[in-house]
Amino acid sequence: MKTINLTESTDWNFIEEVKKESGQDPSLCYQCGNCTAGCPYSNFFDYPVSQVMRLIQTGQKETILTSKAIWLCATCETCTTRCPCEIDVAHIMDVLRIMARRENKVSEKDIKTFYDSFLDSIKKFGRLYEVGTLISYNLRSGHLFTDSDLGPKVLAHNKIHFLPKKIRGSEKVAKIFERYQESLKKHG
Amino acid sequence: MRVGVFICHCGNNIAGTVDVKAVAEAIRKIPGVAYATTYMYTCSEPGQDEIKQAIKDHNLNRIVVAACSPRMHELTFRKTVEKAGLNRYYFEMANIREHISWIGEDKEANTKKAIDVVKMAVAKVMQDRPLYSSSFRINKRVLVIGGGVAGMQAALDCADGGLEVVLVEKSPSIGGMMSRLDKTFPTIDCSICILGPKMVDVAQHDKIKLYAYSEIDEIKGYVGNYQIKIRKKATYVDWTKCTGCGACMEKCPSRNAYDYFNFGVAPTKAINIPFPQAIPKKAKIDPNYCRHFTKGKCGVCAKICPTKAINYEMQDEIVTEEVGAIIVATGYSLLDLEKLPEYGGGRYPDVISGIQYERLLNASGPTAGHILRPSDHIEPKTIVFVSCAGSRDKSIGIPYCSNFCCMYIAKQAILTKDHIPDSQSYVFYMDIRSPGKGYDEFTRRAQEDYGVKYIRGRVSRIYPKGKKMVVKGVDTLLGSQVEIEADLVVLGTAVLSNPDAAHLAEKLHISYDTFGFYVESHPKLRPVETNTSGVFLAGACQGPKDIPASVGQGSAAASKVLALFSKDMLESDPAVAKVDINKCIGCLKCVRTCPFQAIKDKELRDGRIVADVIETVCAGCGVCTSTCPCGAIQLQHFTDNQLLAEVNALCLA
């Protein structure tokens, strides 16, 4: 176990940033562990959720932003539901992913790629175009045949379609993305 | 008019953020102010001497002290000016600490505000009139509400001190929560063995009049002279005839009545005596389950009773008692298991509360002291205790610690090992809170000598799997999720105030907090007093507390009553409402709005009807003053003219 020098490694700005961007107060967490107790993905995490919260409290920016846990989180919100201190833990995980992207510290590149493919599809069609997302993900990630074995099975059940289905007002959905990009430019 | 003004530094408390010298400078310029100075600690003895000396030297006849809240030192300074020969109401206190120096850091703004506040006090003191208190006789009897261990202790101490005590208990027996416990921490002594003698003392004391199964209907009056209406609820058994033989309970055919004493661990009979040591040991019918009441026929108990005590026609009876002081010791309630759905509370019979487990451990409980789980009456081998079940959980509105769960869970885990030597207990905890004498050693003993496994973390979910209950939680020290297949789960449910606590508080005119616990007069220095004089608190009605603390408070409240009653007469506060009979038009709106029933109508010699204030009953709240359409009723020391003088001082500045 390595010693963490709290005098040198505590990033006070990071604590403030998380607080500001998430609108949540990490100091409310009293480390009961209920988030970890209910988390369905805790087995795969390098740091269980309660430790992610603790790492925020101690300002361990580098450790959190390069962790796998924040990318393996499925945003099921069990942690948020169970938290006795009413902290929206899942939202904090979201904020941490955004920060990791911004700082180019993404540890799970494939997951990030999947998010990108998913969002591109929403932007383009206003809803999810499964086949397009899959192809885009497989090409971008280089895992060309991921889930290709599932194709015939879901096709047989008429669960996915070869052609995208556009929804009414898809351009309005695209505008949401534009507005977000603009606000990023304006406020950094 | 020669006003003297004393501005206190209060060390750095005031002088740190208020320029006290500048305040004195500004106040000195007000016409009528003959003397203004500052002092390091005005409340100290030399500080008070300086006021007395200045009154003499400068011929002062009105005094203002600008310092802390009048709740701290108003009485101190009133006595000081009285000693110097002035009427004690020729004194005003300007609060420049709690209202100014402690809440702002801007010295310039604070100083300006302090000058305004002192100016207002000077304007008011110039309008003050001398007031004189009168004295009245006190009734040296005391009412104790609640017959748990705190109330019993208070009643016994008062009675031993020579006072007549009226003890009112809402359930059929005294003893409260403690009478349900099996053993007590940290000594593992039998609860009823130490409580029983106290209960007998209460029953046998010739100074204590016990009303069991009774509630407070109405409280009228004021410190020294209260009139209490007590509702003796119908028991359908004539207690003057009942001998407590229990024959009725044995023969009663209605076997499914809810057992309030055992917290529903097992059903009881519709006519029952709650437990063998009950005091009074009398039977009572629960009309919700009795066949005579639900089906209109039965009458078995009436036939079997050897003393013909059963009376199905019994009605509630109201009796009146007169007392001079009241001790409130109404205790607490517990969070309903159903409020914890993630733990399966209320859905799974083998998830029970700590107090229910206590009844399973107890020899006089429904299982005669054998630990048998409710679902199939099999002895559990793996028992999981969950502390903070509801406590310290802001999301369900209970942010506070319930105080004694850590300790009773350790006790129950130890007792479990004694009962079932091949059992294994686990305790999920967030923090072990054991600050009492011998308490921490006790929780260590559970772990070191009894092999109880303590797991630092919360439980997320409890669900059934075959005959087992799966407890899913976390061990935060391991940083990993854990799972236990338990036979029985015991939840340390949160301590709540009584559901009718607010209702009683309104009758008593005392305050309660967000959670329904009664508020003491000062959290440190007046822990058993309330802000209503003559009403005292004891036990968990003021906040969750264990037996030693409850007993301590019971004795403390009793000593307060004994001190109050050590005088024969009490002085009344002259700052009460007063009617100007020349202005009163006799509309009697004030009579109807007075929350203390302190105003009555009075016929003058010319036949005119006017309002009349009973000085000793009036609490000086001022509601009548704002109701009166013609300004005829004025609160002394807070008259319209006095308050307007303050407003003028602020607005014309």
Image (tube, rainbow, N blue to C red):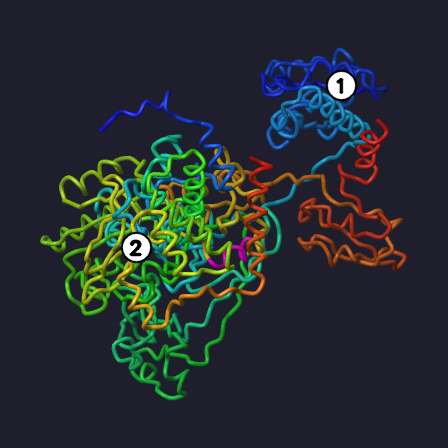
**Which tag, 1 or 2, sits closer to the chain's start?**
1
Q: Which residue is drawn at 28% across and 55% down?
A: A145
Q: Quadrant of residue B433?
A: top left
Q: Which amino acid does label 1 sit on?
A: Gly
Tell me the distance, in whole angstroms, between the alpha carbons under discs 1 and 2: 63 Å
Q: What residue type is labelled 2?
A: Leu
- Give x and y (percent) for residue B601: 78, 57
Chain for disc number 1: B
Residue B47 part of the magenta segment: no
Horizontally, residue B175 falls left or right of residue B161, namely left
Mark 1 or 2: in front is 2
- Give x and y (percent) for residue B138: 58, 46
The residue that mark 2 highlights is B491
User: Which element carries disc 1, helix, strand or loop?
Assistant: strand
Q: In which quarter of the image is residue B430?
A: top left
Q: Residue at x 58, y 52 (%)?
A: A175
Q: In which quarter of the image is the C terminus of chain A?
A: top right
Chain for disc number 2: B
Where residue B4 is drawn, which disc sits there? 1
**Camera-side residue of B176 and B323:** B176
B93 relative to B206, above or below: above
**Camera-side residue of B146 and B180:** B180
